[in-house]
Amino acid sequence: MNQVTPPLLSVTLILGGARSGKSAYAEQLLSGYENRLYLATAEAGDAEMAERIRIHQERRGDGWQTIEKPLELATTLAAEAQPDRPILVDCLTLWLANVLAAGRDAETETQALSVALRGLAGPVVLVSNEVGSGIVPDNALARQFMDCAGRLNQVVAGSSDRVLLITAGLATTLKDAKP
């Protein structure tokens, strides 16, 4: 990606489909900062997921502090946000899957995240999958996830200063509150 990236705002949401380049784009946004935090929501539940995590870690390289928090996203953001340390959350849809698997209420957790985003002491970039552009799944669990993810993305977009959609590694600005 040889694009000029915009300056960080308080809250930036980066949406995209699987393998769209959204994580790499988010990492690029924070590449000029020395003191940056990667808030990972994924859990390596099997060998394939462990390999995905390894690839992400390798691509990021050194220079990132990493905290793994599969569930406590709102409280971790509130505790870790600092004016001179941008945070990258990768990714919201994995966090949502963890929330649902833990039997927690997705709406309550989404609202807690929205409240936390409005009061952060430093900038945050959140990555999330756009899952509503495909076919409607044929089973209730997958439909529940798709519905919850759509609502999550809408709520977080509403709390964001900037929202970008990544397609084939290219960014389209959906919302931009200029600094």
Image (spheres, grey):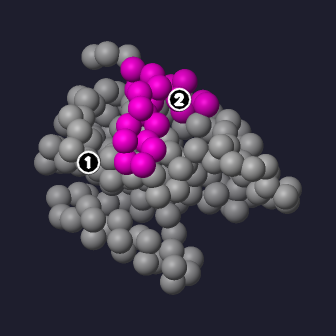
Q: In the rendered structure, which amino acid carries the disc numbered 1?
A: Met
Q: Residue shown at 21%/34% (left/top)? A: 4
Nearer to the camera, 136 or 178: 136
Q: Is residue 155 above or below residue 71?
A: above
- Percent coordinates x, y for residue 104 in the rendering: 71, 52
Q: Residue shown at 70%/39% (left/top)? A: 107
Whether residue 38 is visible, yes or no, is: yes
Tag 2 residue: 157
Tell me, yes or no, whether the highlighted magenta stretch contains residue 45: no
Q: Is residue 139 above or below residue 132?
A: below
What is the crowding at mark 1: few (fewer than 14 residues within 10 Å), some, or many (at least 20)?
few
Whether residue 118 is visible, yes or no, is: no
Q: Residue shown at 69%/61% (left/top)? A: 102
Q: In the rendered structure, which amino acid carries the disc numbered 2?
A: Ala
- Percent coordinates x, y for residue 81 in the rendering: 33, 39
Q: Quadrant of residue 139?
A: bottom right
The span picked out in magenta is 154-176
Q: Residue shown at 26%/48% (left/top)? A: 1
Q: Is residue 177 above or below residue 48?
A: above
Quadrant of image for the C terminus: top left
Q: Earlier in the sequence, mark 2 or mark 1?
A: 1
Q: Farthest residue in the top direction? A: 178
Left or right position of 157 against 38: right
Query: Rounded to the nearest whole Å, what is the CA distance between mark 2 and mark 1?
Result: 24 Å
- Percent coordinates x, y for residue 38 in the rendering: 33, 54
